């Protein structure tokens, strides 16, 4: 499935605040994304002139929900001038999008996939669970972030501050699950979490697919800015990922 | 049709080297890309003799109305370009301009000679922004050196040679004159301006390659000044670029003497930007003529 050529303007149809996150919804009438794919997003107005006279480039945002009638939802967290502006969008404003781009997750052969997500990295795993099922193991810093658990069906939660769920890292939950019933692992989250997940998958000899995040200028293979080191050399996250087999990531 | 060094181009807008990848684009957007190709010629990414992995990440830093990149010219080398990329690029519906870079006149000569018998390559753009290993300056930063480079390379090719001038020099017009005296058929400018970015957390240099090049709207006024100075100095055609984001930006470069306009960083924001800018430019030129 190829992406429509060129940037398009869509109207923001929904906006919902969930803890630290903002969920933005629109429709894409030209393409249907697959779980793990992403769009480059920008606000049609006031894109620029924020902190440091930014943003300038679009922001790569993975698809959280793919619904009927071309509905597509994104999960945002304000962490800089681009995501700040996107979080401030109001319903009815214009959203510029290019995409959907990238290689997503593989359709799993079995339904007992373990979905390991951390922070904003939970977004593509929502799409995975809605499409193919799987048991979500989620790690969050605090209660405001843990509100993101509501997007999942029957998740198991780890919290750094120990106030709800397992007190500690999500990889400890993964250890327990893999010891009990080893199965494929799909993960997305901070780099340290992904490295730890990959190490666990290797130790238990289960396949892993990791969705990476990288700053990128274009999203379609032109700028070569988003590379990640793999066993085959540098690869573009936008084109050869964002989902990579854990085995190729060092 | 626009005549550019003997090539008949459908319009005045092409891509800046390294800012549009037709082969990656075809993977992402499908074969339709070639039917809707947004440029009147396609300029390849820089090709070098040996394969290059490029710089370690991070390679990008968004800056005020612009982008600093430190990509490091990753490419699979001349052999793979000739054997794999050229056959794949046969699908192009517009003339192909191949951009090459070497660190010595001999290396550049070898690249130019290797392209000579490939009819598919309609023109060659010489990226002379490679640092000279002895001086650390870009090899194209010295007018006399640039003239000598062209004198060496010119007899090796019957194809139009376009020199992509470096803006990181004391006098870009003098460099353009050197290129012209050495036998260049055209010059293109501006390349990115040398720039650095610091880590947001105060932890030192941000870019894996140390320094990078600034592009985008932030450099547009500088591009206009340099294109203007070069166009007044040389008689050969000038390809103007630097921060072009709309038809009016393109028209301004043409107004100061550019024959063609190249779109770079704006392609990252919208892959079809070239087509939009071409339409806007057409309207702007008609309005101007009227």
Image (cartoon, rainbow, N blue to C red):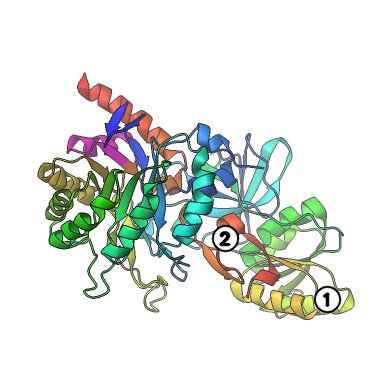
- Where is residue B113 shown, x and y percent of the image? 35, 54
Chain that bears disc 1: A
* Quadrant of the rendered image containing residue B130: bottom left
Classify mark 2: residues with Cα within 10 Å, few (<14), some (14-19) or many (20+): many
Looking at the picture, does residue A124 appear above or below residue A25?
below
Looking at the picture, does residue A55 appear above or below residue A114?
above
* Quarter of the C terminus of chain B within the rendering: top left
Pick the front one: B74 or B262: B74
Q: Name the residue beneath numbered marker 1.
A: A178
* Quarter of the N terminus of chain B within the rendering: top left
Q: Name the residue beneath numbered marker 2.
A: A237
Name which residue lies at 49% across and 47% down: B86
Side (left or right) of B228 relative to A100:
left
Chain that bears disc 2: A
Q: Is residue B251 magenta?
A: yes
Which one is earlier in the sequence, the residue at label 2 or at label 1? 1
Pick the front one: A72 or B39: B39
Name which residue lies at 27% across and 47% down: B162
Residue A147 shows in the view = yes
Q: Which residues are magenta?
A: B245-261
- Residue farthest along the top direction in this orientation: B290
CB within 8 Å, label 2 to label 1: no
- Residue farthest along the right direction in this orientation: A180
Residue A76 shows in the view = no
């Amino acid at each position: 499935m190829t992406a429509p050529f060129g940037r398009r303007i869509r109207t923001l149809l929904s906006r919902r605040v969930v803890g630290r996150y903002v969920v933005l919804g629109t429709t894409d009438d030209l393409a249907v994304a697959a779980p793990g794919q992403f769009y480059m997003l920008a606000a049609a107005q006031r894109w620029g002139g924020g902190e440091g006279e930014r943003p300038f480039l679009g922001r790569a945002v993975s698809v959280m929900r793919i619904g009927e009638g071309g509905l597509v939802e994104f999960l945002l967290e304000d962490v800089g001038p681009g995501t700040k502006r996107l979080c401030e969008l109001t319903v009815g404003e214009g959203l510029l999008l290019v995409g959907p781009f990238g290689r997503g997750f593989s359709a799993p052969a079995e339904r007992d996939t373990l979905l390991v997500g951390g922070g904003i990295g939970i977004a593509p795993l929502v799409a995975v669970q809605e499409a193919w099922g799987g048991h979500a193991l989620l790690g969050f810093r605090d209660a405001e972030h843990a509100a993101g658990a509501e997007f999942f069906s029957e998740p198991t939660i780890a919290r750094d501050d120990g106030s709800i769920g397992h007190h500690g890292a999500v990889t400890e939950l993964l250890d327990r699950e893999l010891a009990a019933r080893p199965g494929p692992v799909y993960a997305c989250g901070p780099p340290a979490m992904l490295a730890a997940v990959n190490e666990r998958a290797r130790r238990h000899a289960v396949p892993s697919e990791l969705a990476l995040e990288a700053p990128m200028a274009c999203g379609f293979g032109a700028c070569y800015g988003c590379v990640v080191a793999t066993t085959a050399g540098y690869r573009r996250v936008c084109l050869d990922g964002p989902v990579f087999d854990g085995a190729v990531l060092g | 049709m626009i005549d550019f060094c003997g090539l008949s181009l459908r319009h005045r807008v092409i891509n800046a080297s390294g800012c549009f990848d037709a082969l990656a684009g075809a993977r992402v957007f499908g074969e339709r890309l070639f039917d809707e190709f947004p440029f009147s010629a396609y300029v390849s990414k820089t090709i070098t003799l040996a394969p290059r992995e490029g710089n370690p990440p991070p390679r990008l830093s968004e800056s005020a109305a612009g982008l600093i990149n430190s990509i490091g010219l990753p490419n699979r080398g001349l052999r793979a370009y000739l054997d794999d990329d050229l056959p794949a690029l046969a699908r192009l519906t517009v003339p192909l301009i191949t951009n090459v870079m070497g660190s010595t006149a001999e290396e550049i000569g070898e690249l130019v000679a290797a392209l000579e018998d490939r009819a598919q390559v309609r023109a060659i753009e010489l990226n002379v922004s490679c640092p000279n290993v002895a001086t650390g300056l870009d090899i194209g930063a010295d007018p006399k050196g640039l003239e000598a480079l062209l004198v060496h390379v010119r007899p090796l090719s019957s194809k139009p040679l376009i020199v992509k001038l470096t803006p990181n020099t004391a006098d870009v017009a003098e460099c353009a004159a050197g290129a012209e005296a050495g036998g260049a058929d055209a010059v293109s400018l501006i390349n990115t301006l040398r720039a650095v970015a610091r880590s947001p957390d105060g932890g030192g240099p941000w870019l894996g390659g140390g320094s990078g090049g600034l592009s985008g709207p932030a450099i547009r006024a500088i591009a206009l000044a340099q294109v203007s100075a070069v166009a007044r100095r040389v008689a050969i055609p000038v390809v103007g670029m630097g921060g072009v984001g709309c038809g009016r930006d393109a028209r301004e470069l043409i107004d100061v003497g550019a024959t063609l306009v190249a779109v770079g960083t704006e392609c990252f924001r919208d892959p079809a930007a070239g087509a939009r800018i071409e339409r806007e430019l057409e309207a702007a030129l008609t309005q101007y003529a009227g």
